[in-house]
Amino acid sequence: MTEELQRVRAPSIRDVARLAGVSHQTVSRVLNHHPSIRPETKQRVLDVIEELQYKPNRAARALVTSRSRTIGILSASSTWYGPASSIAAIEEAARAAGYWVSTANIESSDARSIADGLAHLAAQGIEGLVVIAPQVRVFDTLEQLSIDVPYVTLQSTARDPDHALSVDQIAGARMATRHLIDLGHRSIYHLTGPQDWIEAEARMRGFLDEMSARDVPTTAPILGDWTADFGYHAGRELLTVRDFTAIFSSNDQMALGLMHAVRDAGLEIPRDVSIVGFDDIPEAAHFWPPLTTVRQDFAELGRRCVALLLGDLDPAAPDYRGTITPELVVRGTTGAPAF
Amino acid sequence: MTEELQRVRAPSIRDVARLAGVSHQTVSRVLNHHPSIRPETKQRVLDVIEELQYKPNRAARALVTSRSRTIGILSASSTWYGPASSIAAIEEAARAAGYWVSTANIESSDARSIADGLAHLAAQGIEGLVVIAPQVRVFDTLEQLSIDVPYVTLQSTARDPDHALSVDQIAGARMATRHLIDLGHRSIYHLTGPQDWIEAEARMRGFLDEMSARDVPTTAPILGDWTADFGYHAGRELLTVRDFTAIFSSNDQMALGLMHAVRDAGLEIPRDVSIVGFDDIPEAAHFWPPLTTVRQDFAELGRRCVALLLGDLDPAAPDYRGTITPELVVRGTTGAPAF
DNA sequence: TTTCGGCATGTTCACGGTCACACACGCCGG
DNA sequence: CCGGCGTGTGTGACCGTGAACATGCCGAAA
């Protein structure tokens, strides 16, 4: 006996057709909700589909329609709370719309790794692209590679506002800064994110705008890297001079590091130093003291992003394009300066 | 003129063949590194590929080979640090191996949403599945749905150790507990994760094992939910009685909430209460005091996971299956009890 | 010299869908 | 009475690729 038990082929549209006593095209029509199908024929086909546990073959469909129904996400630092939240929301919205989501993470922001990631996504024929790699450089590379699918970036970039969807970082930074100024602070430092990040730049811009609008003398921002480690070390350095009463950190992690440094120096928050963060990560409410910060609705961002990509937006609905306004969450790390 | 400028079709293997003066099959052979190709023919084909910017069509390839080269990730709570890190690592490893990664997040752990997520992944013909939805219930559903692709779960589950790859939660929990006992603590509470999470159960098991091995009387674990919020409220409640000197929290977020509550009560860490967390999230080193915790190498987990799935492991190499040992990181939240 | 096996390449077909077109039928208006 | 149209359904081609099989050539073994 040379006959082997061989792997059963998954049922195809023709198998269904045969059992239902119709042509394969009729089955296809049922699957695609074609109007001209007699209800009883349709039911017969559906019964057989159920019986055979027939599942349409995505590859075959993609081949003939040239549509992959896949959205690609190019993401840097997807382990961080914000990007991760957005990705989850994108996936959820995409799935609801019948799309698949495929991700490519880039560990560094050099042109090579960006191009690799994009090529990887492009090779699977994505129909839309979401970029959550917020470095300026990514956009240069994006332009060079002449991406020919619709794309959205989750960062506000003046360069192509048509493709951007973001929380208004500048407004958020101004809120944070205004809050400190309103409390009476006049010597305020700003800890930025990495220079090549769009958000870092925008938050710095917001800080500087508000400071000059209120005629508060500005010190040069301190260029950080988002990590709590950096916040800690920057804090230690700043405290050797201690010519300030407040710090606006451009994210919560660095704010946490700062708080650590402040306490190391034997000082109290907010009595000696006020601190504002940015993002409102879930832990922020439990820092000691609970962190005053700016909340971004990352999930909403992800949802709108898919809607924008798929062009599913009701033209009559409010324009989702553009920015989402963040929200200042005042907690325990800010107060009036002691002197 | 009715002629329209129409969207140019992407070059196919036949276009390449025509320009190179060979058959399409020869081009296919070049693409698939078939040995029997004359070097000059190969070069000619490669030149044309470069010239036309030819990119293989994934759908066509998947159709004919019945291989999607896609790995699916079913993930719950992907916005948390651990899962997010693992996902990123999986994606990286998969990409390096020439695979795509598609994700499905489930927001709740009910059977319906698990089945939905799996169906979504199955519909695209994934070749492998990674489950990072660590609830017990997921595995029940998984069994019912008779998944017929190789899969790995990133949680140790006694139920099917062949498909599990995880950090040894029990060992980690024992390390943490042993550390507290060694410091002299005898009244130790344990704050668990949600009851239906594999990890939560394993950490609790480790805690109980070590306690009884050392003949320390055990109090009933407090059933938590991973959030800092819960840690805070549980802490407040516990402190009304204050019949303990140490708490082992089964994750860092709840530990943070606990620390918050301890300070609210005017107590000091670790003088009055010692706390150990679990995970070593990046922020843990900057809590006040820096958190003693158990480090899990999530990235390594993701990498091994893909290797396991693809069966790419060198049989001669150390067996990657099974568990990874975590590491106790002693920082500032633990010390000898005051009395 | 003949045969045979391996190399390099070509030809044909299959994968599982959708699309364009054909066709049978019944109804309606001129 | 006939042509046209709408409804419901079938037929065949086609998407881009890889596998199976076929072919021609060349060198080594019989």
Image (cartoon, coloured by chain):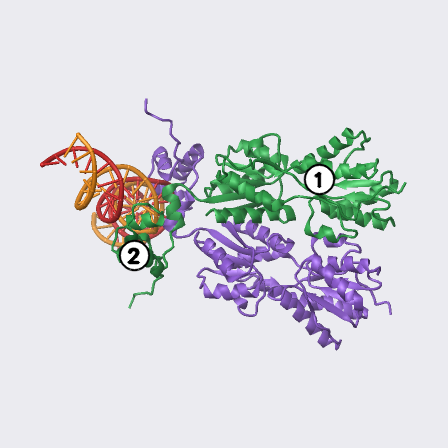
Chain colours: A green, B purple, C orange, D red
Q: Is residue A59 above or below residue B205?
A: above
Q: Is residue A137 left or right of residue B248?
A: left
Gap between marks 2 and 1 measured at Cα: 61 Å
- Above or below for C10 versus B197: above
The residue sitting at the top extreme is B1
In which quadrant will I find the N terminus of chain A? bottom left
- Judging by the rendered image, the residue that carries numbered circle 1 is A193
Mark 2, secondary structure of its residue: helix
Check if mark 2's residue and mark 1's residue have beta carbons within 8 Å: no
Q: Chain of mark 1?
A: A
Task: Name the kind of residue labelled 1 in the image.
Answer: Gly
Q: Residue at x 70, y 36 (%)?
A: A203
Residue A74 location in percent, x, y? 56, 42
Front position among marks 2 and 1:
2
In the image, A165 versus B89, the foreground residue is A165
Q: Is residue A197 visible?
A: no
Q: From the viewer's perspective, is A337 left or right of B27?
A: right
* Residues at discs 2 and 1 both on one chain: yes
Question: Which amino acid lies under the numbered mark 2 shown in the image of this protein?
Answer: Arg
Nearer to us in this view, D4 or B232: D4
Q: Is residue A283 visible?
A: yes
Image height check: is B164 above or below D24?
Answer: below
Tell me where residue B25 appears, x and y as whole percent.
34, 43
